[in-house]
């Protein structure tokens, strides 16, 4: 009887070829995901329109890896940035700008450079500084946008283009 | 009299090109540069702003760069159909790029001399939905769309 020199095993072949690549892809995906998270948080912090603020929105930008499958048989690799249920309530108004609806508005704490809000000073030039203590105010003017979502998407596309050298 | 530098030339060129097209093919639409002013004008309004700018080195060893600019176009529609038609129109007009003009200004625009082109390398098209009842939003925020263009200049800068 002639013994086979080489035995065909699909699992072994898959593990040594695509399985090995999957590990590298997962590592690359994690690097991109964490850079994306860092970029978005920094963008929000650096582009505030007003002094003060709690920094809650930036802190709520999380990174979660996505990996479906078992062992080396992976079908999906990726990441999620920010979980909607955990984001600050006004995340869309900050990203795109707009007037927050009266029914959902809550008071924010702060002061006009140390002074209380005063309706007679409607077109005044003092800057609102958010923060603990101080006075309560409901904003009626449009929130100016901080385009952190579109800016991050552009950054990620550019980063992936650079590392894959696709123009 | 003052001469605009590159960033202002790029912004003014895109606003002028889109404003000219919109006034030609539509009626009752205002093109505005400042986000806050949009809320003092009845919709439909188109707001064009320039966002981040990247200066990409052309090659190692030189100081020459090529500028890539992010342009944010916010559409404030008067209805959902108006929003969709207007954003499709703007996307179709943006695909071919824009003429790059150099402006000399003294109060108003004195001259705009064409000098090259602005190339659109990427378009993102996103509906803006605030996930609240429409009747609670101001008329400006009910039917919104955002188009983000990635625009590159066709020459290098020293």
Image (spheres, rainbow, N blue to C red):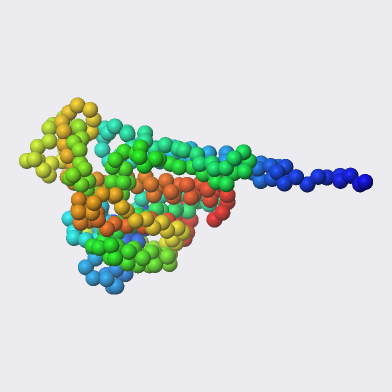
Q: Which quadrant of the view contains residue A9? A: top right
The residue located at (78%, 47%) in the rendering is: A8
Is A4 placed left or right of B143 in the picture? Answer: right
**Drawn side of residue B75 relative to residue B120, left or right:** left
Residue farthest bottom in this picture: B24
Residue B42, given in percent of the width and then of the height, sits at 18, 60
Instruction: Pinpoint residue B77: horizontal percent, then vertical percent.
Output: 26, 61
**Residue plotted at (21% across, 68% down):** B28
B77 shown above or below A41: below
Q: Nearer the viewer, residue B102 or A88?
A: A88
Residue B68 in picture, x, y percent from top left:
44, 53
Q: Residue furthest top?
A: A133
Please name whichever residue, A129 or B50, is drawn nearer the observer in this view of the structure.
A129
Hey, which quadrant is residue B152 in on the image?
A: bottom left
Q: Does any portion of residue A52 appear in the rendered image?
A: yes
Task: Report the residue at 44% width, 62% height from top.
Answer: B119
Give the side of residue B151 with respect to residue B33, left or right.
right
The extreme left residue here reads: A120
**Position above or below: B71 against A27:** below
């Amino acid at each position: 009887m002639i013994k086979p020199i080489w035995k065909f095993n699909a699992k072994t072949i898959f593990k040594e070829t695509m399985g090995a690549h999957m590990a590298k892809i997962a590592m690359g995906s994690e690097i991109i995901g964490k850079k994306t998270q860092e970029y978005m948080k920094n963008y929000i912090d650096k582009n505030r329109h007003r002094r003060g603020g709690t920094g809650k929105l930036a802190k709520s930008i999380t990174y979660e890896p996505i990996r479906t499958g078992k062992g080396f048989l992976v079908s999906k690799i990726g990441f999620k940035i920010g979980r909607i249920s955990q984001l600050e309530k006004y995340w869309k108004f900050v990203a795109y700008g707009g007037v927050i609806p009266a029914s959902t508005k809550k008071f924010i704490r702060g002061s006009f450079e140390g002074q209380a809000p005063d309706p007679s000073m409607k077109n005044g030039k003092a800057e609102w500084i958010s923060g603990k203590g101080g006075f309560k105010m409901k904003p009626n003017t449009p929130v100016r946008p901080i385009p952190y979502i579109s800016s991050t998407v552009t950054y990620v596309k550019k980063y992936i283009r650079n590392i894959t050298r696709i123009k | 009299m003052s001469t605009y530098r590159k960033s202002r030339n790029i912004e003014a060129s895109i606003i002028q090109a889109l404003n000219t097209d919109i006034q030609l093919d539509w009626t009752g639409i205002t093109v505005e540069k400042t986000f806050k002013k949009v809320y003092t004008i009845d919709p439909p309004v188109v707001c064009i702003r320039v966002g981040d700018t990247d200066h990409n080195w052309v090659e190692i060893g030189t100081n020459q760069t090529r500028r890539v600019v992010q342009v944010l176009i916010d559409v404030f529609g008067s209805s959902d159909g108006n929003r969709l038609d207007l954003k499709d129109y703007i996307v179709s007009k943006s695909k071919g790029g824009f003429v790059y003009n150099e402006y000399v200004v003294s109060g108003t625009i004195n001259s705009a001399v064409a000098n090259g082109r602005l190339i659109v390398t990427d378009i993102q098209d996103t509906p803006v939905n605030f996930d609240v009842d429409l009747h609670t939003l101001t008329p400006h925020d009910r039917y919104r769309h955002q188009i983000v263009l990635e625009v590159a200049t066709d020459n290098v800068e020293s």
